[in-house]
Image (cartoon, helix red, strand yellow):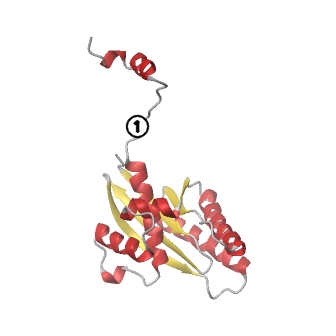
């Protein structure tokens, strides 16, 4: 059970980077904020990276997240786009590491599966499900779906970290019996 935690979720991008922050209190998640970092006005890729770093650090300093959940870049056909996206993700991660925030990376498929039950869900379906789960008003929803993708990463992390961890470390039945003798009725 999670007593009190703030999770920052990031959907990395080089044109628009989305983020969402949830606060978990007594195992009940609530949205703190969602937003985007607009990067389209910067023509230089390195200036975009600088802006990502500065804004992620500002978000961290403003909201004091305990953990960062970030979407992993998906493998596309365009290698250059993949490299740029990986750099954007890396810079966001470096900003969190600079503030000693632990990071967990999730594949887009895992995030979509956690939110909608369908790993192939569209951005619109993810946004709609989050709107329903958190009872978000229309004015809180942004036109850029990158914001709800960031929120989805944070909520996925909450779902993953709130599950009890079941350890299955048995080689065979004999091993199970040996490790559970006190529970066996004789």
Task: Find residue 136 and report its horizontal and vertical position in percent.
Answer: 31, 74
| In this rendering, position of residue 124 left or right of residue 92 | left
Q: How many marks?
A: 1
Q: Residue furthest top?
A: 186
Tell me, yes or no, if residue 20 can be seen here.
Answer: no
Q: Which residue is mark 1?
A: 166
Residue plotted at (44% across, 64% down): 112
Residue plotted at (40% across, 77% down): 124
The front one of 70 and 126 is 126
Give above or below for 5 relative to 152.
above
| In this rendering, position of residue 137 left or right of residue 79 | left
Give above or below for 114 relative to 59.
above
Residue plotted at (65% across, 61% down): 94
Residue 50: name its quadrant.
bottom right
Task: Find residue 34 and report its horizontal and vertical position in percent.
Answer: 43, 73
Task: Find residue 5 and report its horizontal and vertical position in percent.
Answer: 41, 54
- Quadrant containing the C terminus is top left
Task: Find residue 42 and report its horizontal and vertical position in percent.
Answer: 67, 86
Residue 22: name its quadrant.
bottom left
Residue plotted at (69% across, 73% down): 84
Q: Residues within 10 Å of mark 1 (few under 14, many from 20)?
A: few
The front one of 123 and 6 is 123
Give above or below for 173 relative to 16.
above
Tell me, yes or no, if residue 92 can be seen here.
Answer: yes
> Helix, strand or loop at disc 1?
loop
The front one of 116 and 93 is 116
């Amino acid at each position: 059970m999670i007593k009190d935690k703030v999770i920052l979720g990031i959907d990395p991008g080089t044109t628009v980077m989305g983020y969402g922050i949830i606060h978990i209190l007594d195992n009940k998640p609530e949205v703190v904020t969602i937003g985007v970092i607009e990067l389209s006005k910067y023509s230089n890729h390195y200036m975009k990276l600088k802006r990502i770093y500065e804004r992620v650090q500002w978000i961290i300093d403003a909201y004091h997240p305990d953990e960062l959940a970030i979407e992993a870049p998906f493998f596309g056909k365009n290698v250059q786009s993949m490299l740029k996206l990986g750099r954007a993700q890396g810079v966001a991660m470096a900003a969190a590491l600079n503030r000693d925030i632990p990071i967990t990376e999730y594949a887009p498929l895992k995030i979509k599966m956690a939110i909608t039950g369908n790993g192939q869900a569209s951005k619109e379906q993810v946004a709609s499900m989050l709107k329903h789960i958190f009872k978000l008003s229309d004015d809180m929803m942004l036109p850029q779906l990158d914001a709800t993708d960031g929120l989805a990463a944070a909520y996925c992390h909450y779902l993953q970290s709130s599950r009890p961890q079941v350890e299955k470390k048995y080689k065979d039945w004999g091993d199970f019996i040996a490790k559970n003798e006190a529970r066996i009725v004789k």
